[in-house]
Image (cartoon, rainbow, N blue to C red):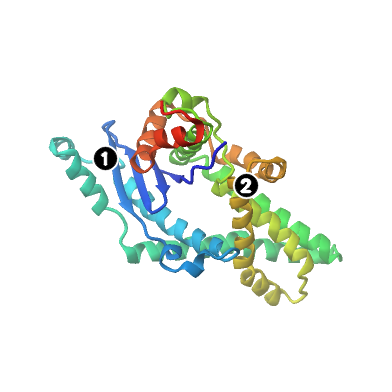
Amino acid sequence: MKYSGIGGQAVLEGIMMKNDQDYAVAVRKPDGEIAVKKEKHVSFSDRHKWAKWPFIRGIFAFVDSLSLGMDTLSWSASFADDGSSDRKKKEEKSEEPEDRVKKGKSAGLSKAETVITVIIAVVFAVGLFVVLPTFLSNLLRTWISSPVLIAVLEGVIRLVIFIAYVLLISLMKDIRRVYMYHGSEHKCINCIESGLPLTVENVMKSSKEHRRCGTSFLLFVMLISIILFIFIRIEYLPLRMLSRLALIPVVAGLSYELLRLNGRFDNRLTWILSRPGMWMQALTTREPEPDMVEVAIQAVESVFDWRKFLEENFGDNS
């Protein structure tokens, strides 16, 4: 496996792929056509070099990824079939593809809306995965006196809530398809980094799990928090809640460094570290259909010259 540097995210009926500052979103529209939007995204870390320092870069990378993800998700949702009239559908079919792409782009979230959405998402996540497990574990103090065991149980509760949340939203039809597109994103990257030409046939044969997945990052967050909170024991519940919130950047920074380590190196240590995350991805990825892979390939080819990559790293320009 050779590190390519590209990454992505599944959106509604499509894929976003990012390479350096270039990103592209490819979406399969209700009429079967594939709409592609390619733009540049200058992150906070690109504007401020100090934000790329180890152990703090993960915080900015996570927020930046969440912001871009919300924006691209909104753009993809603008193509959803909203039950418009036949006349409107005929008008849309008569438009040039470029016009329809621009219309989709304009339907996305504004910067202010994106910021508000990100804030709401972060508050919801913190409440569900940080505050709630801490509160529930505190109830166990009536029967359990060991602070170490309480900290471990808090982490277990957090993990159970996460798994239950993933399984619950997978009952939604749209989310199941997002998980399939998530699988096609991983398969494309694995195909390239394994040295195979980016074809539908090769992608379908590739693995749907990948070491740099955000699912692995979230699992690292949970496991590291268990270890860290074992050593930070505070009896008073409000202060313990506050300490959990204050340590979120520390946990996120450490988790990001582990994720980078797994993605850039291929040895026995990284293989062991990546196993839990790869197992967790069994819940957030599914085997895609060939037409989903076609969408993913278009997103990749919009931002990444995979033929040049194969030639430079594998001596193959097929």
Determine which quarter of the picture holds residue 240: bottom right
The residue depicted at 46 percent of the width and 36 percent of the height is 312
Foreground disc of the pair 2, 1: 2
Q: Quadrant of the N terminus?
A: top right
Q: Is residue 148 above or below residue 35?
A: below
Q: Secondary structure at mark 1?
A: loop
Q: Amino acid at mark 2?
A: Asn
Mark 2 nearby-residue class (10 Å; few <14, some 14–19, many ≥20): many
Q: Is residue 292 above or below residue 267?
A: above
Residue 14 visible in the picture = no
The residue depicted at 54 percent of the width and 32 percent of the height is 194
**Residue 159 percent location from the top left of the image:** 67, 52
The residue depicted at 47 percent of the width and 25 percent of the height is 202
Mark positioned earlier in the residue sequence (2 or 1): 1
Q: Nearer the viewer, residue 142 or 189?
A: 189
**Residue 136 percent location from the top left of the image:** 70, 62
Q: Quadrant of the C terminus?
A: top left
Q: Amino acid at mark 1?
A: Gly
| Residue ID for mark 2 | 262
Mark 1 nearby-residue class (10 Å; few <14, some 14–19, many ≥20): few
The residue depicted at 55 percent of the width and 65 percent of the height is 53
What's the distance in space between the residues labelled 2 and 1, CA to CA? 44 Å
Residue 83 image label: 1
**Residue 7 percent location from the top left of the image:** 47, 46
- Mark 2 and mark 1 residues within 8 Å of each other at the beta carbon: no
Q: Secondary structure at mark 2?
A: helix
